[in-house]
Amino acid sequence: MDPEEEEFRINHAGLVARSTAGHAARGMKIKDQDDMWVSIQHHTFRNWVNVQLRETGLKVDDLSEDLRDGVALVTLIEILQNRRLRKVKRVMNQHQALENVTTALNAIAEDGIKLVNIGELFYGV
């Protein structure tokens, strides 16, 4: 399937997934469409992140790649928490990227948000 067809499929599925009351998935039969639902959620979250980052000049096209060095992630957390966090702006190595991601995760945890299954994302556990 070419990218244009895939985009149409996701957008159409997203329209079907929204009810008139604005509740997601009430109008969509999700069974056997898990991959489409994941695509919709991924697309929606990426768009939301880009709206939050709009004033910073940062843009996320691929979540796994563009959040990898932690710069956009820390910036997103700064915006959401309305406070400055320490970050390495020009990441030169894996240690600096890990420092940024750790800063972001610690800031989230300080807000009392419990982080679960996060190791799987970073360590493939």
Image (cartoon, rainbow, N blue to C red):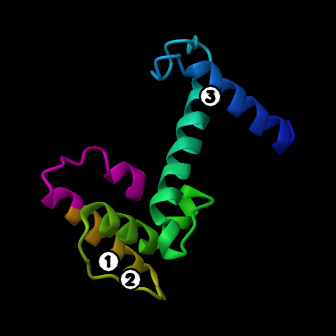
Q: Position of residue 17 (x, y in %)?
A: 57, 21
Q: Is residue 8 left or right of residue 99?
A: right
Dot 3 amino acid type: Gly
Q: Position of residue 35 (x, y in %)?
A: 61, 29
Residue drawn at the location 30% of the way across and 44% of the way down? 117
Residues shaded magenta: 108-125
For label 1, the residue is 99
Quadrant location, the N terminus: top right
Q: Is residue 6 above or below residue 74?
A: above
Q: Position of residue 26 (x, y in %)?
A: 49, 13
**Secondary structure beneath disc 2?**
helix
Q: Which residue is mark 3?
A: 14
Q: Nearer the viewer, mark 3 or mark 2?
A: 3
Identify the disc placed on residue 96.
2
Mark 2 vs 1: CB contact within 8 A: yes
Residue located at (45% from left, 70% from top): 72
SS of the residue at dot 3? Answer: helix
